[in-house]
C-alpha cells in the first residue's frame, strides 16, 4: 500500500481569534483547532490540566460498592489476593492495589499469570489454587482482578462455588453477559454513563485505591502518608495509561501530565532504579515518549519472557538494593527481548520478500520457534514497513496445538472485522481494529491466509488503497525555531488520541547521503537543507527501507513529513526532525 498525505486546512481568522482570546501563540491555536478545541476554557483545560480535574472515585461505576466490600474485608482480617495481567497496565495496576492494602496493614498476595502456560485473564485453575492450596488450606477469601475479568463469566460462577468473594476491576469491552461478581468496577459498565470510557486498567485500580484510602481516612482529604502514596500511584497509573495506548484525553491527559511529574520528583525505589538503567535520571522533565520507548519496553519484556511477577516486585519494593538488582536484571531481559525481536523480524521479513508478491493486500507469516511474547512487536514493525496488515504466527513445533498469532493493521483496515469473516477457519480470535490475536490450526493456515487476504481486499476496495498520513500543517524549516518547538511541546503529553503534530514541507535537499546509526545500524541520520536553513533529521528503524532510495535522490528536492522535537546533547539544545515519510518533489500532485 502507498501513503497518501492528508494536510489539514485551517481557517486563519479562527486561528487569530483563539490565539488572541486565549493568549497563546498562533501555532498552538492552529493545532488546538485541529484537535477540535475551539473555545478559551477548553484550551485552558487542555494546556493546563489540574490534578483535581480527576473525577472522584465514587463517580466511577461500581467503585463505591467495591470499596465498601474491600474495606469490610480489611476490617475483618480477610485474606486478599490481587490478580493482575502480564503487561505494564496490569503490573502497575496490581502494584497500586497491593501497595494500598499494605498501607491499610494487609499483606495482600498477588498473582500474575504466565503468558504462555496460563494465558490472559482469570482462570479456573488459579481460582482453585487461591481457594485451597496443596496442603488443603484456604489461601484467599477475596480475589480482586486488575485489567481483566470482565469476560470471566464461568470463572465468576466457580468463585461462588468455591466460596471466594470476587471483585472485578477492568476496562476491556464488556460482553453480552456480565460475570456474577460481588462487584464490578468498569468505566463502560452497561447502563451507566461515565464521561470517560477510555480509562486504563491501572487508572481503574487507582480510583479503587483512592476510594479505599478516603474511607480509611474518614474524609475526602486523605492522611498525609496516604496522600504521598497516592501521588506515587498516580505515577504508576500514568505508566499503565501510556503503555496501554488509551486516548490521552480528558482524565487520562490529567493523569499522565501529573504522573510524569510524580515519577520524576518522587519515584519509588524501583522506578528510580529503572529510570537509571534507562538513562532518564538527568532529565528535567519526563515525556510520555520516555515511558513508551524507555520504561514500558523494559517492564513489558518481563511479561514477554514469562517473568511478569518481577515487574510488580520492582514497583513494590522499598529496598534500594533489591530495586537496583531487579532493574539491572529487567534491563538484561529487555536486551534479550531485543535480540529475539531482531531475529524474528529478519526471518519474517525474508519470508515475506521471498514467498509473497508485493501486491498482496496483507501478510500472514508463520514459522516454528517464534516467541509468542515477541510476535506482536514484529507484526507492528512489519505493518509499518510494508504498509499493509501483518499477522505473525508462532506454530506449535509438535503440530498438536494451534499456532498462536498476533496481528497489526494500518489505517483504513479493520482487523476485527476481517478476522470475523474468517472465524470458521480459526480456533479463536479477539482484539480490535488495529491489533488482534488469534489461534489457527496448521492444516487451516493456507485457507485462512487466502480468506484473510480477500477480507482485507474487500475493505481496501472501499478506499483508494492508500494508507492515509494525517498532517497537521505545512511549515518551512526556517519556522521551526527552538521557541516554536517549545510552544508545540505545550500540547503534550503526546500519545493515542493526542499524537505529536506532524508537519510537512517541500523543496528540501539532502546535503550528503544518509548515514546509518544506532545499534545494528537500524536508524538513519539525514542532513537536510531548505534554502539557507539546515536541519538534522533522524528516521528510526528505516535504514533498510529508505537508505538506498534517499541516497539515490542526490541533490534533487524532496517533500518530507516530520515531527519536530528538541534534542538535548551535552547541555545544548537544538531542533531535530523525526522523519515520518518522504516523497520526491515530483509527487507533490499526489498529496
Image (cartoon, rainbow, N blue to C red):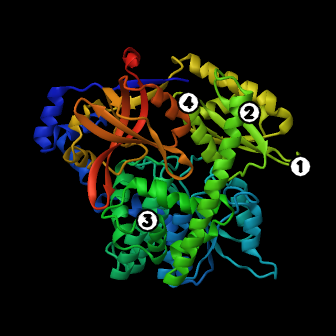
From the image, tell me which residue sits under label 2: 423
Write down the residue under mark 4. 387
Instruction: Look at discs 4 and 1 and give the one toward the viewer.
Output: 4
**Residue ID at (64%, 35%):** 390
From the image, state whether disc 2 or disc 3 is nearer to you: 3
N-term-proximal mark, 2 vs 3? 3
Residue that numbered label 3 is attached to: 279
Mark 1 or mark 3, which is nearer the start of the sequence? 3
Above/below status of 93 relative to 505: below
Q: Secondary structure at mark 4?
A: loop
Specify the quadrant that holds the N terminus.
top right
Query: Among all residues in the image, which is located at the extreme top?
Result: 589
Mark 1 to mark 2 CA distance (whole Å):
24 Å
Inter-mark Cα distance, 4 to 3: 32 Å
Residue hosting label 1:
398
For the residues marked 4 and 1, what is the alpha-carbon distance in whole angstroms?
33 Å
Q: Nearer the viewer, residue 30 or 529?
A: 529
Residue at image position (74%, 33%) is 423
Q: Quadrant of residue 32?
A: top left
The crowding category of the residue bearing disc 2, from other C-alpha atoms within 10 Å (few below 14, some 14 to 19, many at least 20), is some
x, y (%) of residue 235?
A: 41, 65
In the image, 361: left or right of 194? right
Dots 4, 1 in contact, CB < 8 A: no
Amino acid at each position: 500500500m502507498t501513503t497518501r498525505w492528508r494536510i489539514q486546512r485551517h481557517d486563519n481568522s479562527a486561528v487569530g481569534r483563539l490565539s488572541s482570546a486565549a493568549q497563546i501563540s498562533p501555532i498552538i491555536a492552529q493545532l488546538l483547532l485541529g484537535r477540535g478545541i475551539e473555545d478559551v476554557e477548553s484550551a485552558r483545560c487542555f494546556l493546563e490540566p489540574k490534578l483535581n480535574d480527576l473525577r472522584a472515585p465514587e463517580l466511577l461505576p461500581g467503585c463505591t460498592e467495591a470499596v465498601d466490600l474491600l474495606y469490610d474485608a480489611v476490617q475483618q482480617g480477610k485474606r486478599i489476593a490481587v490478580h493482575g495481567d502480564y503487561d505494564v497496565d496490569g503490573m502497575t495496576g496490581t502494584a497500586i492495589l497491593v501497595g494500598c492494602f499494605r498501607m491499610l496493614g494487609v499483606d495482600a498476595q498477588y498473582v500474575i499469570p504466565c503468558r504462555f502456560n496460563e494465558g490472559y485473564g482469570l482462570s479456573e485453575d488459579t481460582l482453585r489454587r487461591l481457594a485451597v492450596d496443596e496442603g488443603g488450606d484456604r489461601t484467599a477469601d477475596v480475589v480482586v482482578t486488575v485489567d481483566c475479568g470482565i469476560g470471566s463469566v464461568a470463572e465468576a460462577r466457580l468463585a461462588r462455588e468455591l466460596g471466594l468473594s470476587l471483585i472485578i476491576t477492568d476496562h476491556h469491552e464488556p460482553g453480552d453477559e456480565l460475570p456474577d461478581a460481588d462487584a464490578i468496577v468498569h468505566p463502560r459498565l452497561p447502563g451507566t454513563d461515565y464521561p470517560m470510557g477510555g480509562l486504563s486498567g491501572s487508572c481503574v485500580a487507582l480510583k479503587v485505591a483512592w476510594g479505599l484510602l478516603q474511607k480509611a481516612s474518614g474524609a475526602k482529604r486523605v492522611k498525609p502518608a496516604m496522600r504521598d502514596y497516592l501521588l506515587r500511584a498516580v505515577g504508576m497509573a500514568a505508566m499503565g495509561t501510556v503503555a496501554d495506548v488509551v486516548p490521552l484525553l480528558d482524565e487520562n491527559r490529567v493523569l499522565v501530565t501529573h504522573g510524569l511529574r510524580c515519577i520524576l520528583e518522587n519515584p519509588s525505589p524501583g522506578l528510580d532504579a529503572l529510570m537509571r538503567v534507562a538513562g532518564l535520571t538527568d532529565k528535567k522533565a519526563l515525556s510520555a515518549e520516555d515511558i513508551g520507548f524507555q520504561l514500558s519496553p523494559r517492564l513489558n519484556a518481563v511479561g514477554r519472557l514469562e517473568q511478569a511477577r518481577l515487574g510488580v516486585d520492582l514497583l513494590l519494593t522499598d529496598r534500594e538494593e533489591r530495586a537496583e538488582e531487579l532493574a539491572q536484571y529487567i534491563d538484561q531481559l529487555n536486551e534479550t527481548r531485543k535480540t529475539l525481536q531482531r531475529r524474528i523480524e529478519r526471518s519474517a521479513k525474508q519470508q515475506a520478500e521471498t514467498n509473497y508478491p508485493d501486491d498482496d493486500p496483507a501478510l500472514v507469516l508463520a514459522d516454528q520457534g517464534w516467541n509468542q511474547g515477541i510476535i506482536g512487536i514484529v507484526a507492528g514493525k512489519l505493518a509499518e514497513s510494508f504498509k499493509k496488515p501483518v499477522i505473525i504466527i508462532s506454530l506449535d513445533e509438535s503440530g498438536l496445538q494451534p499456532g498462536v498469532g498476533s496481528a497489526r493493521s494500518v489505517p483504513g483496515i479493520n482487523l476485527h472485522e476481517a478476522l470475523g469473516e474468517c472465524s470458521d477457519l480459526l480456533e479463536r480470535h479477539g482484539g480490535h481494529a488495529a491489533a488482534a490475536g488469534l489461534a489457527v490450526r496448521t492444516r487451516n493456515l493456507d485457507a485462512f491466509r487466502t480468506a484473510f487476504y480477500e477480507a482485507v481486499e474487500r475493505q481496501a476496495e472501499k478506499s483508494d488503497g492508500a494508507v492515509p498520513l494525517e498532517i497537521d500543517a505545512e511549515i518551512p524549516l526556517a519556522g521551526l525555531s527552538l521557541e516554536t518547538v517549545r510552544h508545540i511541546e505545550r500540547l503534550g503529553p503526546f500519545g493515542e488520541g493526542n499524537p505529536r503534530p506532524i508537519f510537512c514541507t517541500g523543496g528540501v535537499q539532502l546535503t550528503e547521503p544518509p548515514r546509518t546509526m544506532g545499534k545494528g545500524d537500524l536508524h538513519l541520520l539525514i542532513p537536510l537543507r531548505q534554502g539557507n536553513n539546515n536541519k538534522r533529521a533522524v528516521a528510526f528503524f528505516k535504514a533498510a527501507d529508505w537508505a538506498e532510495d534517499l541516497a539515490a535522490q542526490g541533490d534533487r528536492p524532496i517533500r518530507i513529513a516530520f515531527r519536530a522535537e528538541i534534542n538535548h546533547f551535552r547541555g545544548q539544545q537544538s531542533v531535530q526532525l523525526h522523519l515520518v515519510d518522504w516523497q520526491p518533489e515530483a509527487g507533490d500532485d499526489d498529496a
